Image (cartoon, grey):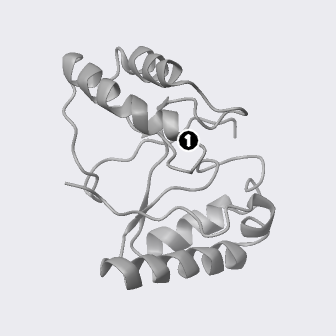
Amino acid sequence: GHTIAIHSYTHDYKKIYASPEAFLEDFEHISTLVESYTGVKPNIFRFPGGTVNSYNKAVYKDITAEMLRRGYTFYDWNVATGDAASGGATKQQCIDNVLNDSINKNRAFILCHDAGDKQTTAEALPAIIDGLIEQGFSLEALDNTVKPVTIPYDK
């Protein structure tokens, strides 16, 4: 029931968004590693920082076009735990952020992190899952047939 997807090898925004080629190099590095360890070649990814951010405004259209040409689907999020904030978030903040932000949404794509300093996110997941189910959500693995959500941005 899980989906393996790609994010970034370096997560160095200045480096990966310097050019479409730099992004693709970083992407191929992590994609090759993931495939070698799992035997799965992922076809889903998430842009570091979201599809459009202050680092990639000049290159995101070229990167997006190339990734779509290569058969990848990308997703952003419309709900966040808040664990990416400086200092992270407590377990209860993660729970509250998700359950409050998911109300009145038909689909919730939740931004969570699993880095070593994000333990409260993992601790919050059982309550988040139970709360989402109580709100009427079902949890499903992503595949490239699921319509993506992207972060609205100013053009």
Residue 149 in picture, x, y percent from top left: 42, 41
Q: Quadrant of residue 12?
A: bottom right
Residue that carries the numbered disc 1 in the rendered image: 118
Which quarter of the image is occupied by the C terminus?
Answer: top right
Question: Considering depth in this image, is 123 or 50 the residue closer to the camera?
Answer: 123
User: Residue at image x 51%, y 40%?
Assistant: 119
Q: Residue at x 52, y 19 (%)?
A: 93
Residue in the foreground of this view, choosing between 36 and 71? 36
Residue visible at 48% across and 18% down?
92
Asked if residue 133 lies left or right of residue 19, the reply is left
Closer to the camera, 6 or 18? Answer: 6
- Looking at the rendered structure, the number of numbered marks drawn on it comes to 1
Relative to residue 77, is residue 11 depicted above or below? below
Residue shown at 73% from the left, 56% from the top: 56
Residue 85 placement, left or right of 80: right
Where is residue 88? Give x, y as percent. 64, 32
Q: Would residue 99 appear left or right of 48 to someone viewing this image?
A: left
Q: In screen coordinates, is 136 left or right of 63? A: left
Tell me which amino acid carries mark 1.
Lys
With respect to residue 121, does 41 lie above or below? below
Residue 6: give x, y in percent of width and height.
Answer: 47, 65
Q: Is 27 placed above or below 84 here?
A: below
* Residue 100 image offset from top left, x and y in percent: 43, 14
**21, 154: nearer the viewer:** 21
Q: Secondary structure at mark 1?
A: loop
Crowding at mark 1 (Cα within 10 Å: few <14, some 14-19, many 20+): some
Image quarter hosting the N terminus = bottom left
Say if 84 sits above or below 33 in the image: above
